[in-house]
Image: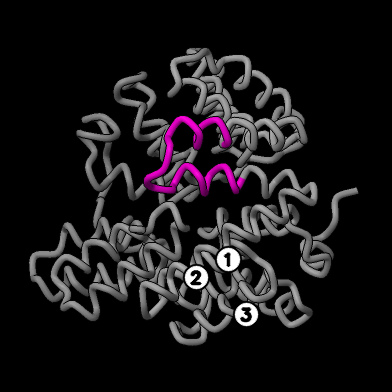
């Protein structure tokens, strides 16, 4: 029996937290979900001692997406979660370290925690350790990739499909055939997709595309979109012109009719480029509706229609506040040093360690 999100929150276990975050954050354009609901759940679990929940709450608090923006409070939550043994918190806290020595100390602690937890048999953390090694600069590349392969293997054999795919990608970069590992990942993910997990259906679409099965990939992408996963809908509208131009208007009519305003805004912002020349609709009206509903990408797209610079900046601010990282980066281009640093840190925290400059 599938546990309720409240029961998952109380359990505090690592994989369940990932599941909760996916369910809430990835459905953030729905009225019954979003960052505010995530902040409430993570806040309750953080109070019970879940270091991973405190990590997510820290990220939400720093970005201000779902909670009152407070960098100092968010960093304090990350520091506490790091001390509580959560490697990801240490990685993120390092972004805000005041000195190079403090930054290195936090990065070293993150690595030590990943190594220790992996050694205790947590296959998921073995996979995360492999990703951390991939981000590392310097050292012996051959030795590093050999270690990554070993760690990905551990996670993959334990049924962690995402790391099977990581293993496949690593094999390809080494000039080997990654297809067997992609197929292994597919067998692990397919049951979740059949059970209605839209995110996993989208993962499968990516994997079948890697194998060259575009027909199956498209079918799965549609399933993911039908399941409410917005990035899958965006991929459909982005590729419809090169795939099947006649399909573009059908998609746009469907999305702009209320199915997915984020995909609708994406289309209407640049119809000739993204969704075919036959697209009809008043872009600004639809974008404004999406922006008012809290869809950051719609606010960002609306900024391109603004004729006055103050209006453009206002829409970008709303887009950034609603979680669109591109809006934050655009604001950073014309910001002063302090504001620019704050915006880039928000993007870094929202995107995870891989989005940060080391």
* Badge count: 3
Please name which of the two marks, 3 or 1, marks the residue nearer to the observer: 1
**In the rendered structure, does residue 349 fall within the stretch colored magenta?**
no
SS label for mark 1? helix
Q: CA distance from mark 3 to mark 1?
A: 13 Å
Q: Is residue 59 found left or right of 117 in the rendered image?
A: left
Query: At which x and y percent is residue 256?
Result: 40, 47
Q: Is residue 304 above or below residue 250?
A: below
First along the sequence among labels 3 and 1: 3
Residue 188 % position (x, y): 73, 29
Left/right of residue 284 with respect to residue 310 in the rendered view: right
Task: Give the main secondary structure, helix, strand or loop, of the magenta stretch.
Answer: helix
Residue 35 x %, y %: 55, 68
Question: Foreground residue, 68 or 59?
Answer: 59
The image position of residue 312, as x and y in percent, is 17, 68
- Whether residues under marks 2 and 3 lie with C-beta atoms below 8 angstroms apart, the answer is no
Residue 105 badge? 2
Q: Which region of the structure is painted magenta?
A: 128-147
Name the residue tied to disc 1: 109
**Element assignment for label 3:** helix
Quadrant placement of the C terminus: bottom left
The answer to whether one can see residue 206 in this image is yes
Q: Distance between the Cα atoms at labels 1 and 2?
A: 6 Å
Q: Residue at x 54, y 84 (%)?
A: 76
Q: Identify the disc placed on residue 80.
A: 3
Q: Are marks 1 and 2 in contact (CB under 8 Å)?
A: yes
Q: Is residue 138 magenta?
A: yes
Determine the residue located farthest toward the left in the rendered image.
308
Q: Residue at x 20, y 34 (%)?
A: 272
């Amino acid at each position: 029996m599938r546990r309720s999100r409240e029961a998952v929150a109380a359990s505090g276990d690592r994989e369940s937290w990932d599941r909760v975050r996916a369910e809430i954050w990835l459905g953030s354009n729905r009225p019954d979900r979003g960052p505010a609901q995530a902040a409430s759940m993570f806040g309750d679990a953080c109070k019970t001692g879940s270091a991973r929940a405190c990590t997510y709450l820290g990220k939400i608090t720093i970005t201000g997406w779902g909670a009152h923006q407070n960098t100092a409070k968010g960093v304090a939550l990350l520091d506490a979660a790091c001390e509580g043994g959560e490697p990801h918190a240490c990685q993120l806290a390092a972004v805000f370290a005041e000195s190079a020595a403090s930054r290195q100390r936090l990065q070293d602690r993150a690595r030590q925690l990943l190594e220790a937890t992996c050694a205790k048999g947590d296959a998921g953390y073995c996979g995360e350790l492999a990703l951390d090694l991939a981000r590392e600069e310097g050292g012996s590349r051959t030795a590093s990739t050999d270690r990554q392969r070993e760690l990905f293997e551990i996670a993959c054999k334990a049924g962690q499909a995402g790391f099977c795919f990581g293993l496949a990608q690593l094999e390809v970069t080494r000039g080997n055939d990654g297809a067997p590992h992609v197929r292994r990942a597919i067998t692990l993910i397919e049951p979740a997709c059949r059970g209605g997990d839209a995110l996993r259906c989208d993962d499968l679409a990516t994997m079948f595309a890697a194998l060259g099965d575009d027909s199956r990939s498209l079918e799965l992408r549609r399933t993911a979109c039908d399941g409410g996963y917005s990035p899958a809908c965006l991929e459909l509208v982005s590729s419809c012109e090169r795939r099947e131009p006649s399909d573009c208007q059908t998609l746009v009519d469907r999305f702009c009719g209320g199915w997915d305003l984020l995909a609708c805004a994406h289309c209407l912002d640049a119809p000739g480029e993204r969704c075919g020349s036959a697209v009809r609709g008043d872009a600004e009206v639809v974008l404004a509706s999406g922006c008012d509903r809290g869809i950051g990408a719609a606010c960002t797209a609306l900024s391109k229609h603004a004729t006055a610079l103050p209006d453009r900046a206002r829409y970008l601010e709303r887009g950034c506040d609603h979680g669109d990282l591109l809006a934050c980066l655009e604001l950073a281009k014309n910001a002063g040093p302090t504001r620019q640093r704050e915006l880039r840190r928000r993007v870094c925290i929202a995107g995870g360690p891989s989005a940060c400059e080391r």
